[in-house]
Image (cartoon, rainbow, N blue to C red):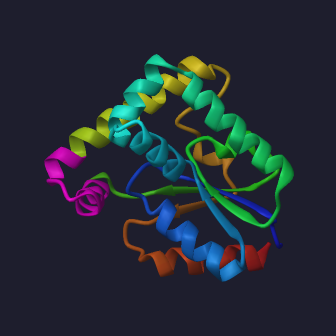
C-alpha cells in the first residue's frame, strides 16, 4: 500500500509532530500541522496557544477557517502527512493513524518542549484537551471527539517508542498493506 494521504491524530505530547515530520521526510511527502498553523496564528495575535484556544471557544470562526483549509488541502493535494486533531474527519480518503501515550509521560514531554514545570504542563494540557473537546462538540456535534480508536487504520502507543521506533512501525504497517 502506498497511501498518498496520511493523517495523524493524537493529543499534545504523543509525538505526532516529531514522528510526522520524520515520516514525511522518509516518504518524500509534505508535512502539515494544524498545531503549527494555530501556533503561528496565536503568535500573530500575541497569544499563547492556550490563550488562542480560549479565543477559539469564543470566536468559532478560527476553527471553522482552519478546518476548511484542512478539508480543501485534502481534496487538492497528494503525498502528504497532516498532523491534526480533526483531519481524520475532514480528509476521509486518508490513511488514519492514532497516537497515544501514558499521560504522565505526555506531561513530561510537554514540560520539556515548552520549558515549563511538569505540574504546569499537566494543568495546561488538561485544560487544552477539555477546551478542544468542548469546542468541537459545539461546532461539530455529529463528529465523535475525541475520536474512537476503531475509526483508525493504525494505533501507535508512543509511550516506550522513540520517534524513530514509531516511524519504523508505521513504515512496516504501510509495507504490509
Comparing 149 with 8, the one in front is 8
In terms of image quadrants, where is residue 43? Answer: top left
Residue 121 at x, y percent in the picture: 23, 48
Residue 52 at x, y percent in the picture: 40, 33
Comparing 10 with 39, the one in front is 39
Question: Is residue 33 found left or right of 80 in the rendered image?
Answer: left
Question: Is residue 134 found left or right of 150 in the rendered image?
Answer: left
Magenta span of residues: 105-121
Q: Check residue 110 for magenta coloring.
A: yes
Residue 137 at x, y percent in the picture: 55, 22
- The quadrant in which the N terminus is found is bottom right
Question: Is residue 104 found left or right of 150 in the rendered image?
Answer: left
Residue 11 at x, y percent in the picture: 45, 48
Question: Is residue 20 found left or right of 94 in the rendered image?
Answer: left
Q: Check residue 41 for magenta coloring.
A: no
Q: Main secondary structure of the magenta part?
A: helix
- Residue shown at 65%/28% (left/top)? 143
Comparing 70 with 99, the one in front is 70
> Does 33 sit above or below residue 141?
below
Comparing 37 with 20, the one in front is 37
> Does 101 sit above or below residue 57?
below
- Residue shown at 26%/40% (left/top)? 124
Amino acid at each position: 500500500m502506498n497511501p498518498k494521504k496520511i493523517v495523524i491524530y493524537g493529543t499534545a505530547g504523543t509525538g505526532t509532530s516529531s514522528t510526522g515530520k520524520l515520516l514525511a521526510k522518509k516518504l518524500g511527502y509534505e508535512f502539515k500541522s494544524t498545531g503549527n498553523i494555530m501556533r503561528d496564528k496565536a503568535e500573530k495575535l500575541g497569544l499563547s496557544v492556550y490563550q488562542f484556544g480560549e479565543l477559539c471557544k469564543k470566536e468559532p470562526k478560527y476553527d471553522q477557517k482552519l478546518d476548511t483549509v484542512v478539508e480543501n488541502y485534502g481534496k487538492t493535494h497528494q503525498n502528504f502527512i497532516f498532523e491534526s486533531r480533526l483531519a481524520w474527519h475532514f480528509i476521509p480518503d486518508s490513511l488514519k493513524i492514532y497516537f497515544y501515550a501514558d499521560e504522565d509521560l505526555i506531561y513530561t514531554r510537554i514540560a520539556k518542549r515548552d520549558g515549563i514545570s511538569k505540574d504546569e504542563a499537566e494543568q495546561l494540557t488538561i485544560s487544552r484537551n477539555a477546551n478542544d473537546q468542548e469546542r468541537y462538540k459545539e461546532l461539530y456535534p455529529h463528529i465523535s471527539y475525541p475520536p474512537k480508536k476503531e475509526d483508525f487504520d493504525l494505533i501507535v502507543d508512543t509511550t516506550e517508542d522513540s520517534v524513530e521506533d514509531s516511524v519504523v512501525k508505521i513504515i512496516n504497517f504501510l509495507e504490509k498493506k
